Image (spheres, coloured by chain):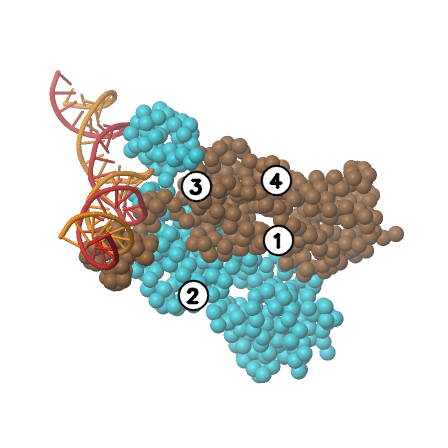
Chain colours: A brown, B cyan, C red, D orange
Amino acid sequence: MRQPSPTLHDVARVAGVSTATVSRCLNSPGQVIESTRVKVNKAIQDLGYSPNFGARVMAARRTNTIGAIIPTMENAIFARGLQAFQEELRKNGYTLLVASSSYRPEVEEEQIRSLIARGADGLLLIGHERDPAINRFLETQNVPALVAWAYDATAVLPSIGFDNLKSMCDLATKVIEMGHRHIGLITAETNTNDRARQRVRGIQEAAKTAGISPDNLCIIETSYGIETGAKALETLMSAKPRPTVVMCGNDVLAVGAIRRARELGYDVPADVSITGFDDIEIATVVAPQLTTVHVPHREMGTNAAKALIEMVEDNKPGEVTELKVSIRLRESLAPPAG
Amino acid sequence: MRQPSPTLHDVARVAGVSTATVSRCLNSPGQVIESTRVKVNKAIQDLGYSPNFGARVMAARRTNTIGAIIPTMENAIFARGLQAFQEELRKNGYTLLVASSSYRPEVEEEQIRSLIARGADGLLLIGHERDPAINRFLETQNVPALVAWAYDATAVLPSIGFDNLKSMCDLATKVIEMGHRHIGLITAETNTNDRARQRVRGIQEAAKTAGISPDNLCIIETSYGIETGAKALETLMSAKPRPTVVMCGNDVLAVGAIRRARELGYDVPADVSITGFDDIEIATVVAPQLTTVHVPHREMGTNAAKALIEMVEDNKPGEVTELKVSIRLRESLAPPAG
DNA sequence: AGCTTCAATGTAAACGTTTACATATCAACA
DNA sequence: TGTTGATATGTAAACGTTTACATTGAAGCT
């Protein structure tokens, strides 16, 4: 039923040349004289030849494939960065292998092994936190890895991203300058997510600097989603004293918080201010528009691809790159009433 | 600096067995006695061994890799479905190769060839519209392909999805029943996107059935995005007579339309109703909440994965599956004023 | 004991490329 | 005419698995 596909040998035989010449026609045509090339190409056409991937990979020792493991594709911030990453890879002749970890470290570990077993020439990972054994594994496998969405010059792996702590600290400082003293905080789970943890610490540091007691900081940790953000806001609004601002670890939580606030009859920002982090599209669409931290996702994806390709091709050690973020002040943040 | 990774031979040597036994340990552990398996696994651990992909593929003649080509990962509707697709693949030991076409047919074609050259065992594609030559190519290469996000029993390739035409027709019928007679329509580009085209035709048919003249249908075609949706709404609102409802080809366009309507001082839905399509998360977050067509994205992704794996493993011909959609009536749609 | 069976393991031949090295050809030049 | 160098092509050895087949040894039978 399934007839064997033609091989290099078949092409060589039909064209009346050696396999080496056929291979060169495909990989470095400049080395082959015109007349030969024509013969070979005709044979390839006639036979409907397409090179065998496995054999090619084995002989050439690379797959031209880069793996990426992200928590989830559903989160817009990863989707956008990943899209840019993939576009840049494609420009350079690489293909993207994707896996998602659902924010679970043991799944991420399994996925790392799986992508390497599938011949990924390099790996894009999110965040720095992982079992040291994995880093050793990456080393023995000789697969370069780059961390994105985080910046940490002291970490084992090179990274490209922004300083989550400092960015959030800057935003919190602005919030405090406006006069807010009771701050609610909705964060994604911090135990397996170093970005989330950094952001919380950023707020804590800003509060400390401003001489605000940690007791005035009411923190709720929840899983990722619009609905969970909504629930968390409800809880916060019944705290005593009620926070005058709710800072959220990301835009999705913030959007959920805004929705629930509205549903509960609170005016945003008159009754309560709300801030986010990431500046995904949704931030400008909600009413009121969301004050948030803008992160250059596409730039990060593109640069990550470039850096990783260099690491793979030139065996270059990875560099640590910090990207600039900026605060987008929009309607959802205002000084507290009174 | 870069020492070669350990091979099957190294493992065999360290464990004191043959390469065949090591291979069996990996692929059919039942055939190997417990004591041997322990020795081998220890050797694998100690060496940090991971099988070479190319060699494995070449010897086994399969990659356990499925390719997907979607217009873009940035669009939430593809991201969510793709995430579910990937999760189901993983459950079955497959990995996902991703490429994006940016809605450009020639790029899609190139990506199809590229993914096949990389050994994809099967392919997930979006929409039915493509050069017949590509379908022939898929056939000669013996790579099964499945179309998602569309349903068409008469098409060459099997598909899983919903009836874009009928779904939109149903929504339009509801809109018309409410009393709307002047309908604005914002659609994504229809020349390279059969889903968009079907949706437009759905509205046209509903209008025809209700005896509404095509002149009362004002169609604007634009590229995908919140901002383009906003611009299109602005244009529509200056048409004479002004439409009492603006139906949008997808939620993203609709959300942009809502925003601009608000910015221009129109009340939605009192001054103008707005509808979307897809029911992505954003639909429940905008104010007013968006009336739209709910599509079971995750279900589609999961089922697509199952079907494709069957096609690959059992050489089964693909089936055509229609999924049910449902209309979500929310605040943004109301009868016209007066 | 001798024979058969079966499970566990070993041996070695593919699998289809790429590429270092060898060889052939030919033009240019002393 | 012989030498040199450049260019085009051929030869054959990897590359690291899987797997058909061969071998071994022990258990179960007569």
| Label 1: few (<14), some (14–19) or many (≥20) C-alpha neighbours in 10 Å | many
Query: Is the C-beta separation of discs 4 and 1 under 8 Å?
Result: no
Which residue appears at 45% of the width and 40% of the height?
Answer: A143
Query: Is the C-beta separation of discs 2 and 3 under 8 Å?
Result: no
Label 4 secondary element: loop
Label 1 secondary element: loop
The Cα atoms of the two marked residues, 2 and 3, are separated by 31 Å
N-terminal label among 4 and 1:
4
Q: Say left or right for D23 vs A315.
A: left
Q: Which residue is mark 2?
A: B106
Q: Chain of mark 4?
A: A
The x, y position of residue A93, in whole percent, is 43, 54
Q: Chain of mark 3?
A: A
Q: Quadrant of the C terminus of chain B?
A: bottom right
Which amino acid, by three-letter code, is at mark 2? Glu
The Cα atoms of the two marked residues, 4 and 2, are separated by 41 Å
